[in-house]
Image (cartoon, rainbow, N blue to C red):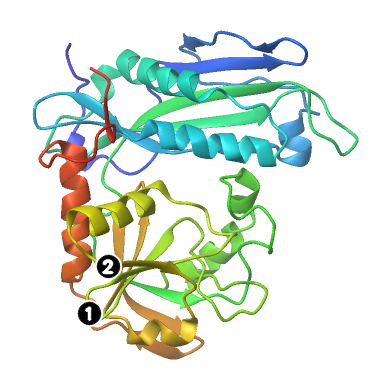
């Protein structure tokens, strides 16, 4: 198999259409069809389709990459499938079966194997599984028909030149309502965050720190990533809330910390008032794995993490190195985490 002629080391984190994508359709009363690989990246829908009228949509994100031994793998695709299942159930959308989801990911990667970047390039093939309501809806109700798709696009590292500590701000807006949809990966959650993230960027901040909307005293997450905190004694702390998206990367890092690195891990409520007491802080997610935080601006009051603005703190760096080592095949991880495709 001959790879595409791309400058793999210079790829941005953006969309580039590849040769194939997977498409399956759900018809009311019939269920899901078998699905197929197609070459057309475009979607044609009626103007009154449920996705346009009431934003019935959810999505996932995972990567395929080349390991040191030349294999092409994905990281825990079954977890992405389970999370999409939860999103679909909350949005009254039909669940695409977990086993078929994983198989569809495999098919897309195999069909686009020439687009999977080589080992050591820092790049990967990003998969975006998503589901949308396709049948016409005018009254406020769930649609009857749906489409599940997986697109693939080669992407470079989220941070060029390595993950440098970022400066974020405490937000005045809320990310999600109590008992709302903050715990699922719905498109509507991200639509409402766009104003605030653009405003943060305009004011020189990389992200927003959202507080719990009920008391506005507890740390929740950013617009698209979970928080990690490290206490001065080396304990890893992650915020607990029913309106936080359950990050697969965060859960994997917690397992690595406790079971492979012998660290103490606390998953609990984290108050904004205690953030200044932590030694390190970061954000975690599929795109960057860990993004270190050097400074938090709380309405003009700066909370400066002891790890500083020059580099990732030692504990988060060790977690980052271990998890990326597992993903690349350099370190043996728990059984089933690295899903071999070819």
* Vertical placement of residue 231 versus 166, above or below: below
Towards the viewer: 129 or 28: 28
Frontmost residue, 8 versus 231: 231
Q: Are marks 2 and 1 in contact (CB under 8 Å)?
A: yes
Q: Callout 2: helix, strand or loop?
A: loop
Look at mark 2 in the image and give the residue it sits on. 264
Disc 1, SS: loop
Residue pointed to by mark 1: 233
Residue 127, percent across and down? 40, 31
The CA distance from mark 2 to mark 1 is: 9 Å
In which quadrant is the N terminus drawn?
top left
Q: Residue at x 23, y 60 (%)?
A: 163
Taking the image as shown, residue 188 lies to the left or right of residue 66, namely right
Horizontally, is 269 left or right of 29 in the view? left
Image quarter of residue 186: top right
Q: Position of residue 105 (x, y in %)?
A: 40, 23
Q: Is residue 296 left or right of 144 when viewed as pictured?
A: left
Residue occupying image coordinates x 50% and y 35%: 82
Rendered residue at 24%/58% (across/down): 257
Residue reaching furthest to the right: 139
Q: On residue 282, which mark appears?
A: none
What crowding class fits label 2: few (fewer than 14 Cα within 10 Å), some (14-19), or many (20 or more)? some
């Amino acid at each position: 198999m001959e790879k595409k002629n791309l400058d793999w080391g210079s790829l941005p984190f953006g969309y580039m259409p590849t040769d194939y994508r997977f498409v399956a359709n759900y018809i009311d009363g019939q269920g899901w069809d078998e699905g197929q690989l197609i070459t057309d990246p475009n979607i044609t829908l009626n103007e009154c389709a449920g996705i346009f009228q009431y934003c019935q949509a959810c999505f996932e994100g995972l990567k395929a990459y080349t390991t040191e031994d030349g294999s092409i793998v994905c990281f825990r695709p079954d977890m992405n499938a389970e999370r999409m299942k939860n999103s679909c159930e909350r949005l009254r959308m039909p669940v695409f079966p977990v086993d078929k989801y994983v198989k569809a990911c495999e098919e897309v990667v195999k069909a686009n194997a020439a687009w999977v970047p080589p080992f050591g390039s820092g790049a990967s093939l990003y998969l975006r599984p998503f589901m949308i309501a396709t049948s016409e809806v005018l009254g406020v109700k769930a649609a009857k028909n749906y489409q599940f798709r997986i697109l693939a696009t080669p992407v470079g590292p989220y941070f060029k030149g390595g993950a440098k500590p970022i400066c974020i701000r405490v937000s005045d807006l809320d990310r999600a309502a109590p008992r709302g949809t903050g715990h699922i990966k719905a498109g509507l959650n991200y639509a409402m965050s766009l104003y605030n993230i653009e405003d943060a960027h305009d004011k020189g901040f990389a992200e927003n720190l959202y507080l719990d909307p009920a008391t506005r005293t507890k740390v929740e997450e950013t617009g698209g990533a979970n928080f990690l905190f490290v206490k001065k004694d080396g304990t890893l702390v992650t915020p607990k809330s029913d309106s936080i998206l359950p990050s697969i990367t965060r859960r994997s890092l917690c397992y690595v910390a406790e079971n492979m690195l012998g660290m103490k891990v606390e998953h609990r409520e984290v108050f904004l008032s205690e953030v200044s007491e932590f030694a390190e802080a970061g954000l975690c997610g599929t795109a960057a794995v860990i993004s270190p935080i050097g400074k938090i601006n709380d309405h003009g009051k700066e909370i400066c993490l002891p790890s500083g603005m020059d580099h990732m703190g030692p504990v988060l760096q060790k977690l980052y190195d271990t998890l990326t080592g597992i993903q690349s095949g350099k370190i043996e991880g728990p059984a089933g985490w690295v899903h071999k495709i070819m």
